[in-house]
Image (cartoon, rainbow, N blue to C red):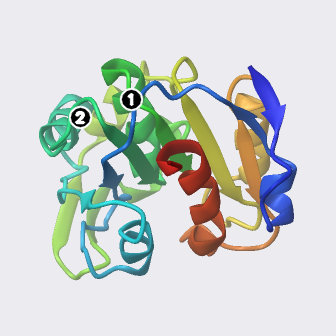
Amino acid sequence: MVTEHRASAHPAIERAQARVGAACVVQRILYCHGFASNFDPEKEKVRALSTLAPVDGVTVDYTLPPSQVFAAFSGAIVAPKNTLIVGTSMGGFFAAWLGCELGLPFIAINPAITPAKSLRKYIGVGRTHYGTTFHLKQEVTDAYSGLLFRLDGDGTVVLDLEDKVIDAHATIAAVENRLPLIEFPGGSHRFDHMHALLPEIQRRFLAS
């Protein structure tokens, strides 16, 4: 069922189309970080989410094939029937895959919807945001060619419209009328509106 959110204080959420559905009663949140990043409980987004429920996570190596990344994230799920999956960027791509494959609700924030394209600029040797060296091979990016962004689960896509890394408007065109969308004006690829998003997560998944 599709409804409009009207109770939230933030206009972006007021305009969002949301699907009421979750059979899952959320007890924990799995956070999936982005490319060249890591899982850090002290990061602002993770700390914000932890005000709602305990947050689990793992640092994955995105230079590994996608099947191994999927396995690493799924292995970090503590409550298999009661987990909300939240991911940003590449983590948003995997949040959608995990949610659809495992039957769990997910929130994909500024997701990479075509990793085979968006990862190309990182092929070769580079450094992560926390200073370690990575080596991304062409064959790993090619492995994403047959993997589409999942649109068949209980998910919501959340966007900062001024994301300069992934084109938010291309994402809208790809998922509009397929998954609920929440769009925030301004912001960035790092996502600057987690605190504004919290009441919606609370309403959908954690309300008593």
**Left-right relation of 92 to 201:** left
Q: Quadrant of residue 66?
A: top left
Q: In percent of the image, x 55 and y 17: which residue is there?
A: 152
Q: Tell me if residue 87 comes above or below residue 98 in the rendering.
A: below
- The residue wearing badge 2 is 70
Q: Quadrant of residue 101?
A: top left
- Residue 170 in sight: yes
Q: From mark 2 to mark 1, how far is it between C-alphas?
A: 14 Å
Secondary structure, mark 2, is: helix
Q: Amino acid at mark 1?
A: Leu
Q: In percent of the image, x 78 and y 25: which residue is there?
A: 2
Q: In percent of the image, x 28 and y 57: which residue is there?
A: 124
- Residue 90 in sight: no
The answer to which of 64 and 54 lies nearer the viewer is 54
In the rendered image, residue 108, in percent from the top left (x then y), is placed at 52, 45
Q: Tell me if residue 199 comes above or below residue 204 in the rendering.
A: below
In the rendered image, residue 91, in percent from the top left (x then y), is placed at 39, 49
Q: Amino acid at mark 2?
A: Phe
Query: How many numbered marks have been drawn onto this rendered protein structure?
Result: 2
Secondary structure, mark 1, is: loop
- The residue wearing badge 1 is 104
Q: Earlier in the sequence, mark 2 or mark 1?
A: 2
Q: Tell me if residue 112 comes above or below residue 126 in the rendering.
A: above
